[in-house]
Amino acid sequence: MAPVLDVRDLAVGFPSQIVVHGVSFHIDPGETLALVGESGCGKSVTAFALMRLLPTTARILRGEVWFDGTNLVSASPPVMRGLRGRRIALIQQEPLTSLNPVLTVGAQIAEVIRRHEKLPHAAARRRVGELLDMVGIPEPQRRAEEFPHNFSGGMRQRVMIAMAVACHPLLIIADEPTTALDVTIQAQVLDLLDGLRRQFGMAVLLITHDLGVVAQWADRAAVMYAGRIVEQAPVRPFFRQPRHPYARGLLGASVNEPEGQSGSADSWHYTTRRLNEISGSVASAAGEPGCPFAPRCPEMIPACRAAPPRLEPVGDGLVACFRAAETEVPHVAAVG
Amino acid sequence: MSLLSVDGLRTRYVTRGRVLNAVDGVSLDVDQGETVGLVGESGCGKSTLGKTILRLLNPVEGSIRIRGNEISDLGQYALLPFRRRMQMVFQDPYGSLNPRQTVETLLTTPLKVHGMGRRAERRRRVRDIVSRVGLPAEALDRYPHEFSGGQRQRIGIARALVLEPDLIVCDEPVSALDLSIQAQILNLLVDLKRDLGLSYLFISHDLSVVRYFADRVLVMYLGRIVESAGHAALWREPRHPYTRALLAAVPRPDPDRPRGPVALRGELSSAEAGGCRFRARCRDAFDRCTSEEPALRTVAPGHLAACHLA
């Protein structure tokens, strides 16, 4: 089956620095791929580059983004406008800033529909009601006449989801969709998005920093570090045996108990176990030729400082680490 | 005697004539050397409670005692000696440090305000605290913008520690930080507690962090404590339906352990008069929940819950 989205060697730069260094990944129809990483790793810039919504100072330096037979990197602005909102939709982190405060939510959803499908007003309004009902907003016809500030954070994100699925897109890019929400609301919103994905057979690119969200709602994970994908694998093998030292470090740094250690409630407490730190910070490797993670890596060898490792098949996934093949230890031992 | 003892505390915001009791009758104790976690969703009043305890906000009712000394009605001047013993670490390491002051000034100011030590003594103390929180001595001459988020949080912690307090109220101290940095800061707080005999009131919306970090946990909902228990008991046997729902909603980094269905309806809204404030979202609500507000009562040794069914 041909992938919905095929990103090949995408690089994005700002005048002062390159922030995405040749990223490649694909998303199959109906699949959820999680792009995971910490702030500044380039995950959001990657998403904006796919949508061609980068800030004006940023440039796509090289690479191809194939979506539904079109290379988005070279597509003309009218072609992109025809795709955005209809075939690819974006859900952003903070719905309050992505919604227009002076228009009713109904008008904003109707605008998306009428922009892409020549529907009469009354029919568009009915569709808006159906959409709001579908995303679980009570009294949809009445709420459609209200403004974004009348909605809570979770409800606003539901409105954003209604807007995103309005034209049944092939792909939804969700950029930290629940980071601003409480944990109980997060679960509701992600369950809703996941349900709609199944219902309409959409693919989802889920951008997040939360490994719990990845484990529960994604099919595959791609871990980014300093503008590169360092590991890519289906979630089960990824959480069972993360191969890249950074991925292992992240799971070890988590305050959640890892897989298979669901023993007593005491086992994951500061009195019994120290959290695994990843020393230093992302800035440590700025301007060095080798692996960007080398300065923080507990398994660094001299070769790591010479050139960045390429993403190569290891186990069930792809890993960019010279030592990935030899480090066949389960991560639990590495953490201890 | 507890280090901190709060009883029947109420804090009220009045906006355009509308009264909101953000903290609505809270009682709690923090013992010497204890870490008490305070967990709840946004808008539940947990930050307001933390600020009221430090008298950054004034309560309308109730008592706050530090080692038995009532401080809820003290004036600003009388409060000074108590302020020295309770400090706060804020969530946002970007917004809570004056961008125009060097780290040395930031750390020396509290000492001056409290008239502690002579110049040389203050310098020694500031240098000592900077190395304790894991910053290099060169950091003293630099400004907050020259540091990363994690380092700034270390500065915030140093500022809280420089007065040698007994109690630190940490308001979401790691929420703004990346996972790898979060682990560094939590480990630092654990080390400092051990080395300096500190007590923490640790406020967070993140159950996983509280689970790891707290000795005892208080769960707050709409201005009230709804459950209080030792960390192990709370996770093994949560008694309040809200606590259970919160625990169930935390996504675990384990694809083979799927979450249960979301056990909670609707969203946090203001409390309706009378009855249990959680009843509108509760799956188990029955007649009595509408007519009678459940009191926080002991359901097992050291375990309290405010639910008729607990």
Image: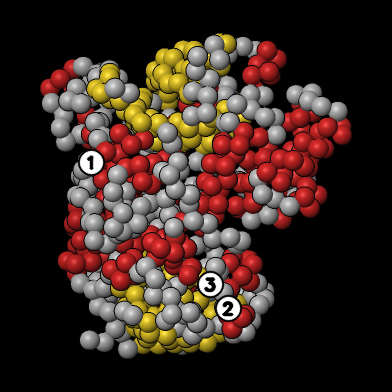
Q: A226 or A184, which lies in front?
A: A226
Q: Quadrant of the N terminus of chain A?
A: bottom left
Q: Quadrant of the C terminus of chain A?
A: bottom left
Look at the numbered disc 2 and give the secondary structure of its residue.
loop
As drawn, the label of residue A299 is 3
Residue B281 located left or right of residue B253: left
Given the image, what chain letter belongs to the residue carrying mark 1?
B
As drawn, the label of residue A232 is none
Numbered disc in front, either 2 or 1: 2
User: Residue sitting at 48 percent across and 79 percent down?
Assistant: A323
As drawn, the label of residue A301 is 2
Instruction: Work out how far the residue at label 2 is from the one at label 3, CA to CA, in angstroms.
Output: 7 Å
Does residue A40 appear in this view? yes
The type of residue carrying mark 2 is Ile
The type of residue carrying mark 1 is Leu
Residue located beneath label 1 in the image: B264
Count of picture labels? 3
- Are there few (<14), some (14-19), or many (20+) residues within 10 Å of tag 2? few
Instruction: Identify the image's colour scheme: rainbow, by chain, secondary structure or one colour.
Output: secondary structure
* Residue A304 coordinates in the image, percent (x, y): 58, 80
Instruction: Work out how far the residue at label 1 is from the one at label 3, CA to CA, in angstroms.
Output: 44 Å
A184 in relation to A58, above or below:
above
Instruction: Work out how far the residue at label 2 is from the one at label 1, CA to CA, in angstroms.
Output: 50 Å
